[in-house]
Image (cartoon, helix red, strand yellow):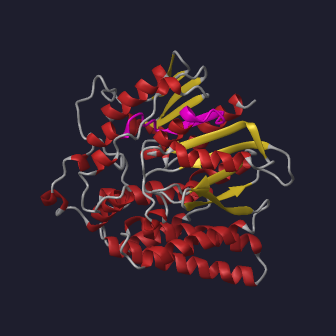
Amino acid sequence: MRRTLALLLCLALVPPGARAAEAPERAVDPHAAHVRFHFQDLEMDFVFGSLILGAATNHGCEIGEAFATAARITDGDAASWQAEWIRTAALVQARGEQSLAAGHAVSAREQFLRACYYYRAAMVSMLPDDPRLRDTARKSRSLLLRAGKLMTPPLEYVEIPFGKTKMPGVFRKAAPGKAPAKTLIMIGGAETFVEDQFFYIAPQAFERGYNFLTVDLPGQGLLPLEGQFFRPAMDKPLRAVVDYALSRKDVDRKRLAMYGISSGGGFAPQAAQHDKRITAVVMNNCVVDAGIGVAKMAVATVTPEAMATWSSFKLQTNEGVAWRFGLDPRDLNGLVKANEGFSFDPPRVSAPAFILVSSGEYGSPEIARQTEQCITTLGSAEKRLVVTPADEGAVNHCVMENRSLMSQEVFDWLDRVFR
């Protein structure tokens, strides 16, 4: 049952006591696994269930392959996780090579897509000094691009200049020809690669007639290896992304949406605040002020003694995030200061705006507070909030475990706005 509020606010099945005014103050854990999929280690289980299994609907995973791999992994062990996903990726890639050599393009494409994302999965707990990181990332991207050549229209590799670097990404036209089409720019968060955004939503965009564009921003993908870390003014690299999109004749200038997930739920509206060429913005979830949010997380006060009790998987995934902000990987407390200034001013966002948040995350007092601050003060004449329901399996971070429901909400809203 849903309660419709003013301002097109749609809140669904929020558990009793989950609203900010009613819930006790507690640490925010955006990666909390609200439903256990396989592993006892909660961080590993979240990544397995939400990131990997969630990608099945978008051709990034096969359930049998995923559980066969999980069965070989030592619970909580980063090295075991890495080795087994690389092993599965290589097996699936080999199948794809066989199909391609025999002229079976569809089979090759599907195998290459899954192998791509299995290599990506292996990198989740790799640290920057791991000599396999760069090579594994290159294998993953190469397979995405090879699969993309077998699509119609094909997936294009792009590099967008920004300062002294180039932001790598992919673009796919909605349809053959030069006709301008509505376009989705997909933006990830603090741990993401282009591949994550592709398998999060790209096939859903293709099926609905949208051009699709996503890139690694400074801080994402392998750009930190070049010294390109996250910085508060994320609207500046995103302006370069919009410049590129609008340089194409196949992009409709009046129907250009930007969708940000996780930390990208702050990057996208910050870009929309400063760049009025963005004609619709989607946040999942809304991050009005990342510094305040991170200050409420466990990393803000975690001690070396506590970190020593963590699994190697949990430790290394958290250290990888610190590195992406230019910190010593062990300086998790430093993430609070590093996130200061990552904010936007909702009243200055005038484009149509949609906030999507899972019921599990909305149970966090701080996430609920920032969400409600945003929806009530947005300068947009058209704005909407949807909290996805727990009883439809849409409870984890960024609704990753139910991407069909997420895509339905996002694209049904965009289709109406762009009508």
- 310 displayed left or right of 257: left
Q: Is residue 297 magenta?
A: no
Residue shown at the point (48%, 27%) measured from the top left: 346
Looking at the picture, does residue 353 appear above or below residue 202?
A: above
Q: Residue furthest top?
A: 6
Residue 408 visible (yes or no): no
Image coordinates of residue 10 in percent, x first then y, are 52, 24
The residue at the point 40 percent across, 41 percent down is 342
Residue 130: percent from left, percent from top: 37, 76
Q: Is residue 403 left or right of residue 305?
A: right
x 55%, y 39%: residue = 271
Where residue 236 sits in the image (x, y, percent)?
A: 54, 45
Horizontal side of 396 relative to 62 (left or right) equals: left
Q: Is residue 318 left or right of residue 12?
A: left
| Along the viewing direction, whichever of 410 and 14 lies nearer the viewer | 410
Q: Is residue 277 shown in magenta?
A: yes
Residue 195, horizontal then vertical, whole percent: 56, 61
Which residue occupies the foreground of this view, 397 or 3?
A: 397
The magenta stretch is 272-290
Q: Is residue 177 above or below residue 166?
A: above
The answer to whether residue 196 of the structure is visible from this angle is: yes
